[in-house]
Amino acid sequence: MIESIRGRSLLSLDDLSKEAIVEVLDTAESFVEVNRRSIKKVPALKGRVVASLFFEESTRTRLSFETAAKRLSADVLSLAVASSSVKKGESLRDTIATIDALGIDAVVMRHRSSGAALQVSRYVPHVRVINGGDGQHQHPTQGLLDAFTIRQILSERHDTTGLESGASLFEGLRILIVGDIRHSRVARSDVAAYATLGAEVRLCAPGTLLPEDVKTWPVTVAGDFDDALAWADVVGLLRLQSERGSGAFVASLSEFTFSHGLTVERARCLKSDALIMHPGPMNRGVEIDSRVVDSSRAVVERQVSNGVPIRMAVLYLSVAGSREG
Amino acid sequence: MSNDDERQARTRGLAFTAKSQLMTADDVTRAVRRMAHEIVERNHDVASLSIIGLQTGGRAPASALASILAEISGQPVSAGMLDVSFYRDDLSRNPLVTSSATNIDHDLTDRTVVLVDDVLFTGRTIRAALNALSDWGRPRAVQLAVLVDRGHRELPIRPDYVGKNLPTSPDEAIVATHEGVWIGTREPS
């Protein structure tokens, strides 16, 4: 168990303690305030170099990581993989060695292979590696920002602050995760964060889209989708990942929408104050109906805007912190 | 010791052991009241003052100063809180202190800012605060009020208003709250 990410790489949420997760959420509260200022910049990482290596396409994660690093005054080296030597067949190891030779303090990376971030952290042990998504394995900052978004909204409802509530609002909270769980790194990070914080997590998916090792996860599996929706305080939807071959696991998109899509009719099963979340990018009309996305219960935009403070918190703790402390 | 002090000490893995009490709660109240009068004496236009406490130790003395100033002058006094964690120059040398929120709801341009902290020691917190302030505008002047000045400055910084001057040795620890001032040691718990 990792008790704090200070001075460490962030590769997975599986081995973070509750205290380590709460520390990131608490630190992010301070950065929410920084992001409301007219000058949205603090000098905490002045003179540090953060490399952003996205071997797989991304819009929001990459933009919000780079925004976060810049708001901490770090210098950002951004590798555009499509126009780099990676296209000439350069290996991951050589690419990392080249970037390391330029002198960097941290790497934010996304890669299509599970375990790529861990591998890089072994190549360059003196560099802090922040996993921005590795294959089907983990997407830690997404899990953290989802937990942060839930805590933020629930603490507003309870007329308290996120800092005061710590992890208490997650105690017994019912969270349902629906859709392509098998291929989803977001689901794996979300489950780790929610379960560690004390929530009750339930999964609902067609049998083919459940992970094979689901018995080892800290979750229960729902039988009936409508019942599960009525049970949930929070519903997290996932993108059907056609690039990872999800198409072969469902009969057809409309079949999936019929059985596990959040349609307008289905959304009526939900509690009136239930939160609807989606990590994006959304397939509107597949896993979620457009009208549901635009309803007041959907907090998708909050998730996106919380991406920057959470990633500032992760970079700040990991890069500015010293492990001895 | 307040909860915040305890929290910060815990974050650093240190526990404070008091050796002796140097000021009682009454002494502190009197010192704060005297500093408020000194502030009015030097700044006739109380309406242009902004009393900014440094998180977390400066929070209580800043709100005490602001309310006494309002009482003396008969008009409301602008107050705020500033967290300087992200502006420190010793981030990589010391364990991070858990940050707490900054709350300044007005532009500081052309105002006279009185920074308030509990203990003035090396001056590095004040240096960080001066940098942070520039993100909120360009104050006409910045003054410094501290409950305790314990010496050992590492930067050319001096306080304008002091509750009490306490000569200390660098390895001693001082805790100053509205309940009193103690000298002691901090050791790993």
Image (cartoon, rainbow, N blue to C red):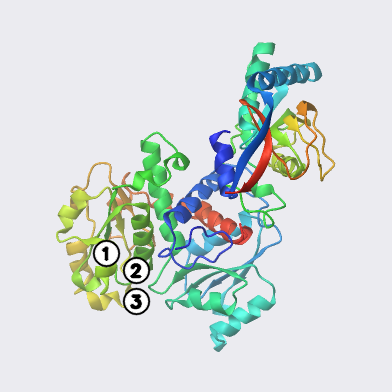
Q: Position of residue B127 (x, y in %)?
A: 76, 43
Q: Is residue A170 visible?
A: yes
Rendered view: B101 above or below A75 = above
Picture quarter with the N terminus of chain A = bottom left
Labels 2 and 1 positioned on one and the same chain: yes
Rendered view: A252 above or below A186 = below
Q: Are marks 2 and 3 in contact (CB under 8 Å)?
A: no
Can you identify the residue that label 1 sits on?
A179
Give the CA distance from mark 3 to mark 1: 14 Å
For numbered disc 2, what is the local secondary structure?
loop
Residue extending farthest bottom: A89
Can you identify the residue that label 3 sits on?
A244
Give the CA distance from mark 2 to mark 3: 9 Å
Rendered view: A73 above or below A132 = above
- State the residue at coordinates (21%, 63%): A257
Classed neighbour count for the residue bearing mark 1: other residues with Cα under 10 Å, few (<14), some (14–19), many (≥20): many
Q: Amino acid at mark 2?
A: Ser
